[in-house]
Amino acid sequence: MKSNLEVENLIVEKDKEVGKEMAKLGNKIEIRDLSMYYDSFKVLENITMSIPCRSIVALIGPSGCGKSSLLRCINRMNDLIPNSKVEGEILLDGENIYNPSCEVIELRRRVGMVFQKPNPFPKSVYDNVSFGPQVMGIDNKKEMDEIVEASLKKAALWDEVKDKLRTSALSLSGGQQQRLCIARALAVQPEVILFDEPCSALDPVATQKIEDLLIELKENYTIVIVTHNMQQAARISDITAFLLMEVQGEPGRLIEYSDTNKIFTNPSDYRTERYITGRFG
Amino acid sequence: MHPKTADRIATVFFWTIGLITLSILLFIILEIFGRGLLTALKPSFFWGQPKTDAPGGGVRPMLFSSIYLACLTILISLPISLGAAIYMNEFARRGRFTNFIRFCLDSLATLPSIVFGIFGMTLFVIRLRWSYCLLAGACTLALLNLPIFLRSTEEALRQVPQTYREASMSLGSTRWATIRKVVLPTAMPGIITGAILPIGRIMGESAAVIYTTGLFVNFLPRSPLDPAAPLAGYIWYAQTEAWVPDYRQIVNGGAALLLIIVFLINYLARKLAKVYSEKKTLGGI
């Protein structure tokens, strides 16, 4: 058995490696001093974090700490909520997405999203995947067929649905529906994909499939995932952010943001440790 | 009291109330059909020409007027209420302004239809010099139905899960594309039912048409600016002012005919909505 010190050294070594890799790839997203309000209620305060290219970043923390709100800042989905307000900036490839000149439609094309409950449209499997490209103006049938097939393949769903592309998406199982939603998001060729607790409505087998898929997708996409499941964060993410609203009514803050290994083996903050060992939350 | 006894009493109580309601409805239906069904089903009645001085007149122009009027009314009020419902549900922020609109609509919905009739006469028939015609009646009925239409359309739009809108927006669609390609198709069964059900009311409305479309015609109206005599208005006319000796038969037969039409329309509305939603879940949109 290795001593604690050895383990720690190992982790530090790995941290360094990860750090080098990150530096090599550069950061896809940089969140700087981000605060967010619903009406006058402050939901998030001074969040700063860098999300490296082609990695999986997990956001964990107890309910109500603002994980989902933070996630929805990255593709400006919060804009849809009246009276929400954001301070600070989020840089996507170095450009602030909260600049007035930023095209929100284009931003949402680049930053896709998969939701907590599978929410395919009440249309056919094919029409679900082709929805985004169609909205973007692709109307060539052959091109569309290729996009649909490629997206479904990337979402590891093609083999299961290739014979029923014209049937209703609602006839698929929950896990298949969620992978269809992933395919739908992939069809517009995003660079970043945000996952908002994508497995919380799924059984363990379907969850396993989604997790495998996420790790595969990491090769080409930058992934940010909100999860309630700490084992899931530990299994699939490279970096973990721990958010916490310490007192009810106060904004959520970023308590710790570091390599997933470190967070789950040797967290720097006592609150992180208490959370991951299950003493609260 | 023992909970079990209380439960039994409550059960009996509500069953009784339910049965009373049902029997009142059944009584009305049977009464109307009992008096007029035989007349209503006679081809010489529903397909015959009306007579002004002899018995045995039919109601063909009236039946035609009613159907024409209903179609015209839907044609006028559907685009307006659909547009307004989309605005209220998809664009407007919930606040003072939308509350004010809703308050006005609710007030409008409770206004007696005779007020609409007088208003329609003053504005369309006299002021705009359309004279008594289908268009005047249709505009009046469109106003009368606007609150009901708008509410049902709004409700249909509200039934569309928010997550559909979010999914669409997250794929980079504009608000309009989301409405057109996701919200409206999903809400369509509800919109269809909401548009068809008031037809029964439009056809049954008499006070609003008496002052706007006319009461008696013996030809089929062609243009929307032709005078007409919808069935419900004609029933009132036959009962109070007609000279024909068999006016009772006309009234009873007309009432039964109206009831049949309303039944048919309601059945059709359900059928259509069902067919549409089945088609939708099969991915046919």
Image (cartoon, coloured by chain):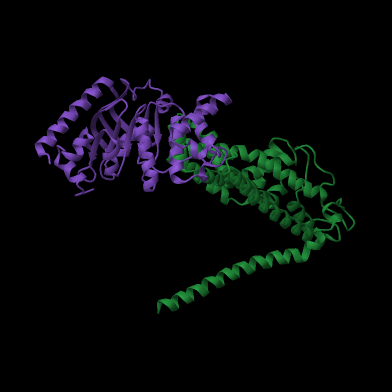
Chain colours: A purple, B green
- Which residue occupies 89% across, 55% down? B53
Q: Is residue A84 visible?
A: no
Specify whether B7 is left or right of B268: left
When asked about the image quadrant of residue B254, the answer is: bottom right
Give coordinates of residue B247: x percent, y percent: 82, 60
Residue drawn at (69%, 54%) of the image: B262
Q: Quadrant of the N terminus of chain A?
A: top left
Tell how many labels.
0
Instruction: Classify residue A259 by image quadrant.
Output: top left
Answer with left or right where residue B232 lies relative to residue A62: right
Q: Is residue B218 left or right of residue A184?
A: right
Specify whether residue A262 is in view. Answer: yes
Q: What residue is shown at x 36% (from left), y 22% (from top)?
A: A100
Between A161 and A172, the one nearer to me in the picture: A161
Residue at the far right: name it. Answer: B54
Nearest to the observer: residue B106 or residue A244:
A244
Q: Is residue B149 above or below residue B167?
A: below
- Residue B167: image location, x then y, percent: 45, 36
Q: Position of residue B233 (x, y in %)?
A: 74, 52
Q: In the shown orientation, is residue A143 left or right of residue A231? A: right
Q: Return the residue nearer the eye: A62 or B128.
A: A62
Give x and y (percent) for residue A89: 29, 26
The single residue placed furthest to the front in the displayed view is A1
Considering depth in this image, is A67 or B253 the residue closer to the camera? A67
